[in-house]
Image (cartoon, rainbow, N blue to C red):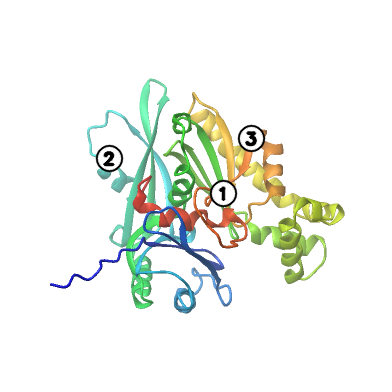
Amino acid sequence: MIRLPLFHYAPIGIDIGSKSIKMVQFSKDYATIQEAASFDFPEPIAAEQDFDAYLAQLKQTLQRARVGRNFRGHDAIFCIHQRDLFLHNIRVNKNESKALANIVQQEAADRIPYSMLDAEIRFVESAELRQGEQTLREVIIMACFRPRLEALLELFEETGFRPISVDVEPMAILRAFTKQYRREADEQDRVLYVHVGYSNTAVIIAEGTQVLFIKYLNVGGRHFDEAVCRQLDMTMDDAVNLRRHSADRRRSQQTPEVERSVLNAMRDELERLHQELAMCIRYHSVTFRGRPLVRIVLSGGEATETLRAELERTTTIETELGDPLRLYDAPQVLGRHGQWDIAVGLAARQLGGKEA
């Protein structure tokens, strides 16, 4: 009998962003990055305005993504974008006899913006907290519109992928960084993860791998670009290039006057981000008492040294630039490492970690 070799490849993590797709695949032993690539959409199309046109563009980009690349196999894990994710926090009596899943269904029925028949619902149990004489448990409800999810699954199959799992962005972000924990103390630390993307900012507060808080903020790279365009009276393309090149240069190569002008032009949007983060930090300190936030991990496509310094200055919390690739052999030039956090977290899902 002739035995053919059995090939097995790690799944491809696919992060579908607002203006690009990022894909990461580990080697079989998860020690190195097999392949990583980013692909911009031909033109930005808002899925909520024209979902069919968005699907057509997504299909075109996914088909292009594998041409000439070193991705292997068909298994893929993708995540639900923020625009398709409904988030809501509830508090449940710890001694409640009714099954938590039933309580979640009842709470979701009153709040989600579509029929329960069309809803895909998951939940994450957060920490216990005291409210008067009661001991309550915070629960984070997550839901998405099933017909839209099914359309995405069908599209992935049409483009040659085999979806084996669906995740949400906050869980992928958390997994990307908690996989780096090596000390027992890391499991006790409370950390504020700030993922600043193009269209929004995802905020996750966690104690080790346990999620305490999730919120999306309506501020991101697009708002920074628009502010620079407006304040410096230049075209949007020029504003994008100026901000990108200024942030990506090494400190020794940066022009202080240009950097200061860009930062001042973004000041109102940065202040809005700082105010939103301050409310998240206050919510944590009031709700989850006992341990302070020990650090902020900044990631996403907008994670730069300038923004890191701004967050540390305004929050007075030690802030680091998150590097989701730190543990892995990644010989390629991948630009800002922080932009790969979601794709890395998706690709690492089968290694374990928090799941929705």
Q: Going by the image, does 145 lie left or right of 305? A: left
Secondary structure, mark 2, is helix
Whole-number angstrom distance, CA of label 1 to CA of label 2 = 36 Å
Question: For the residues carrying marks 1 and 3, which lies nearer the camera in this image?
Answer: 1
Given residues 54 and 343, the one toward you in this image is: 343
Q: Residue furthest right?
A: 257
Type of amino acid under label 2? Leu
- The residue tagged 1 is 323
Give coordinates of residue 81: x percent, y percent. 46, 60
- The residue tagged 2 is 100
**Label located before the other in sequence (1 or 2):** 2
Secondary structure, mark 1, is loop
Dot 2, how many residues are within 10 Å of its Cα: few (below 14), some (14-19), or many (20+)?
A: some
Compared to residue 155, the image places residue 279 above or below, namely above
Q: What residue lies at 38% left-to-right and 67% top-to-bottom?
A: 148
- The residue tagged 3 is 318
Q: What residue lies at 29% left-to-right and 66% top-to-bottom?
A: 7
Give coordinates of residue 14: x percent, y percent. 44, 63
Compared to residue 125, the image places residue 28 above or below, namely below
Given residues 32 and 157, the one toward you in this image is: 32
